[in-house]
Amino acid sequence: MDFLAFVKKARTCRRFAEDKPLQRQDLDFLVECARHTPSARNAQEVRFVEVLSETSAKLFPLTHWAMALKDWKGPYAGERPTAFLGLLLPENCSELCLVDLGIVAQTVQLAATSKGFGCCIIKSFDQKKAEELLEIPQTLRLQLVLGLGVAVEMRFCVDVPASGSLSYYRDKDGVHYVPKRPLEELVIRRFD
């Protein structure tokens, strides 16, 4: 598969095969991929919490899913993530840490896709309760929660419709579509 096709395949996934749970070695693989990413000043400030089984089931209700889909409250039983990966940063890290956080999250998403897993990068969650559940040290803050599992949701990038709406949507069969701006709109200037 060429890289562009792979990136298009690595869309946010919100429905998983709950009967095919991820294992510790799957999460270790994702963190192993993430630890090799570029890091500002090579500070490597991002830390991880691997979450499986019962703790995963307790973390799920603390997360909020697909806010643009008003009639959907998140994955139903049988379609929920079977694992989570918490991404943490030091309490008072520099802005550069946020760049590293994004690089790590995207790397995990691509690594998950390479294994047939789906990944949803979640910023909307009950931070206080999640940090208590995951026993996060006071020197660290839980920044992102990545929902993970074997992907069952079909996801596609499409051109922005004539209405100009960037809202993602699903068709009657539950296929998920994400409108993307055209290249000509994104590149504001070219120099030769």
Image: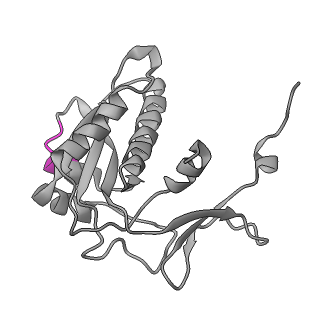
**On screen, residue 162 above or below 185:** below
Q: Is residue 109 magenta?
A: no
- Quadrant location, the C terminus: top right
Magenta residues? 131-136
Residue projecting furthest to the front: 1
Q: Is residue 134 magenta?
A: yes
- Report the residue at 66% width, 64% height from top: 158
- Residue at 47% x, 24% y: name it: 96
Q: Residue furthest top?
A: 41
Q: In the rendered image, which quarter is residue 94 located in?
A: top left
Q: x, y (%) of residue 182?
A: 76, 54
2 left or right of 47 in image: right
Where residue 83 sits, quadrant-wise, is bottom left
Q: Position of residue 30 (x, y in %)?
A: 31, 40
Observer able to see residue 48: yes
Percent position (x, y) of residue 57? 17, 63
Q: Quadrant of residue 186?
A: top right
Q: Residue at x 17, y 34 (%)?
A: 137
